[in-house]
Amino acid sequence: MGWFQLAKVDLTTNFCNFDCPNPFLLAASPVARTADMIMRAFEMGWGGAISKSLALDQDLPDRSLTPRFSRLSANQYYFAGMGNIDFRIDQGVRETIEDWSRVKRKYPKHFFAVSIKSPGVEKNWRELASLAESTGADAIELCLSCPDDDSGDGNQSLGHNPDKVQEVIGWVQKETSLPILIKLTPSITNILPIGLAAQEAGAVGLSATNTIKSLTGVSLDNLVPEPVIGGRSWFNGLSGAALKPIAMRIIAELAQEEGLTLQLAGVGGVRDWRDAVEYLLYGATVVQVATEIMYRGYGIVEELIDGVEGFLLEKGFSRTKELVGLSLKNMLPTEQLSRKYRVAASFDPDKCIGCGRCYVSCRDGGYQAIDFDLKERKPVFREEDCHGCGLCTLVCPVQNCIVMKETKTPFPSGDNVEGGENHALRSCGYCG
Ligand SMILES: Cc1cc2nc3c(=O)[nH]c(=O)nc-3n(C[C@H](O)[C@H](O)[C@H](O)COP(=O)(O)O)c2cc1C
């Protein structure tokens, strides 16, 4: 792909009444803790940043926990998610504000929002709002979703209650006319009343989502939940890849709601340009990133920019804006999906490595529609018994070896109740 082609693509995005150079923003988190960090990220190509949440209790000394992270691993190489517990800014409020005031002075063309966080105390929110405005920020993000503080009138509880959301927005509006973003929690069954309440109160956008309250694991040495902090622990906030399907579902639900016209920022598990494009396709205008930067550094923005530009060119688009919400029209409630469309599995014997994983999964988690030829070490697909669920394609370790093809063969009339033979393979040869 030549540079002359790339020049045709327009990544600029208007967000919160501000023209961002691109839709990639640092999320409120350690990656946007100090002005030097934020400005370094801008130099590397990030279009904007939401600061780590400013909280008045930063002025209390020696409050930070150590350690404060735990890791959710699918295996030793894949970082499926990260738990964090009460990560705070280890610096006083005034010093933090002075520090952040440098950002807009030096980078007027980059988007900068200050995030603020408090339990439901009017005085606190108003003080934080005027401090945030004094930095010269373009917008203020109200964190109403911190999983470390979800009891009583705690911060996350505010984000569960539409009346409280409106009350907090009202307090903040007494101090500032800056655009207001609301940072939403994923730990909620129905997000729509929260989004609609924020809109009615005058917010301009919603960032979905914060981390989800979770437990990443337990140390099997001392039986203490992780991260182990002086022999004890507590629930933590899960971020990263494992959060993405939940946050993306929330973005799509908000974007589908006809009465809701607020701008959306997709945040949760953006690891590469594909994730970013997916968020845009479900209705986000920008994406925010935290965990992947903590894992791989600010430099990932180059991959995000190149990847999205390449995707736009390949698909014949010229601006990221054109992608926003495009996939929503391809969603239909489960009951309205076609029950006539029918596929069945088949495989490519030349690609098959004979591991038997498809056979075992179909036998023990599917419809017993695959046999296994021990002599040839190959599966035998019985199309007439295949219910077309697609499990075999998910578990096959070889790309495009098993495919689901449209078929006219009638749907099997009943379950294969005999249950399949047990002798061919006990478990798949691939995992031993
Ligand atoms: C260590 C850490 C600290 C965070 N602190 C804040 C915060 O102060 N305010 C906030 O609104 N979100 C905070 N977040 C949540 C992130 O902004 C983001 O919503 C979440 O991590 C999901 O994005 P990710 O998967 O890209 O990390 C924090 C996340 C992490 C990992």
Image (cartoon, rainbow, N blue to C red):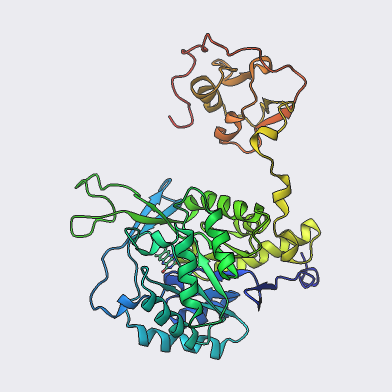
Q: Is residue 117 left or right of residue 58?
A: right
Q: Position of residue 373 (x, y in %)?
A: 57, 15
Q: What residue is shown at x 44% (from left), y 20% (from top)? A: 426
Q: Is residue 373 above or below residue 270?
A: above
Which one is nearer the viewer's eye here, 108 or 422? 108
Residue 279, quarter of the rendered image? bottom right
Q: Is residue 241 left or right of residue 148?
A: right
Q: Position of residue 270 (x, y in %)?
A: 55, 59
Q: Position of residue 298 (x, y in %)?
A: 52, 71
Residue 381, quarter of the rendered image? top right
Q: Is residue 331 above or below residue 199?
A: above
Quarter of the image that includes the C terminus:
top left
Quarter of the image that includes the N terminus:
bottom right
Using the rendered image of the protein, determine whether residue 282 is visible from the camera's viewpoint: no
Number of numbered callouts drawn? 0
- For ligand 1, give the image quadrant: bottom left
Using the rendered image of the protein, determine whether residue 368 is visible from the camera's viewpoint: yes
Which one is nearer the viewer's eye here, 64 or 432? 64
Which one is nearer the viewer's eye here, 215 or 161? 161
Q: What residue is shown at x 57% (from left), y 81% (from top)? A: 138
Q: Is residue 360 left or right of residue 14?
A: left
Residue 8, quarter of the rendered image? bottom right
Q: Is residue 311 above or below residue 52?
A: above
Q: Is residue 37 left or right of residue 341?
A: left
